């Protein structure tokens, strides 16, 4: 119809030059992957929340790995030398003391 409004969903882009583009890929047969934008001072807990927003995988059920090292929640991207274009491995499962849940998200990124 003429004069209609078209909405186009596009991936989130960098907000600033300080942000790093980091790929996250699920290991162990999973096919989940996403690109998240983080800052060098962000810790692993913040990255896990970004992955939760992107993939709907609860932050408390994620284990992130970089260069064969399991990242602790307090590790920052800078402290582990994670830079623009790096890839983190994602293991989904119950972390010690955490419940493993997968949240359903709508295509717009809001919780259902």
Image (cartoon, rainbow, N blue to C red):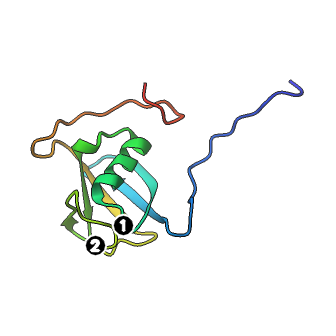
Q: At numbered mark 1, what does the secondary structure look like: helix, strand or loop?
A: loop
Label of residue 32 in the image: none
* 94 relative position to 85: left or right: left
The image shows residue 89 at horizontal and vertical percentages of 30, 59
Distance between mark 2 and mark 1 Cα atoms? 11 Å
Query: Is the C terminus in the top left, top right, bottom left or bottom right quadrant?
Result: top left
Residue 26 seen by the camera: no
- Mark 2 or 1: the one toward you: 1
Residue density around tag 2, few if under 14, some if 14–19, many if 20 or more, within 10 Å: some
**What residue do we see at 49% from left, 36% from top?**
109
Residue 57 in percent (x, y) is at 32, 40
Q: Quadrant of residue 9?
A: top right
Q: Are marks 2 and 1 in contact (CB under 8 Å)?
A: no
Q: Position of residue 85 (x, y in %)?
A: 45, 69
Position of residue 105 in the picture relative to residue 49 (left or right)? right
Q: Seen in the image, is 69 located left or right of residue 10?
A: left
Residue situated in front as seen by the camera: 41 or 32: 41
- Residue positioned most to the right: 2
According to the picture, the residue beneath numbered tag 1 turns out to be: 41
Seen in the picture, residue 14 relative to 34 is either above or below; the reply is below
Name the disc covering residue 80, or none.
2
- Residue 62: x %, y % from top left: 25, 48
Q: State left or right for residue 37 relative to residue 27.
A: right
Question: Looking at the image, which residue is at 86% across and 24% down?
Answer: 1
Residue 6 seen from this side: yes
């Amino acid at each position: 119809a003429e004069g209609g409004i078209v909405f186009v969903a596009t991936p989130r882009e960098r907000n600033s030059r300080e942000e790093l583009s980091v790929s996250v890929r699920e290991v162990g047969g999973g096919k989940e992957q996403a690109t998240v934008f983080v800052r060098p001072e962000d810790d692993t807990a913040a990255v896990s929340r970004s992955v939760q927003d992107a993939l709907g995988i609860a932050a408390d059920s994620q284990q992130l790995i970089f260069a064969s090292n399991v990242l602790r929640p307090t590790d920052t991207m800078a402290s582990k030398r994670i830079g623009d274009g790096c890839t983190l491995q994602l293991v989904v499962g119950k972390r010690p003391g955490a419940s493993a849940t997968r949240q359903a998200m709508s295509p717009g990124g809001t919780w259902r």
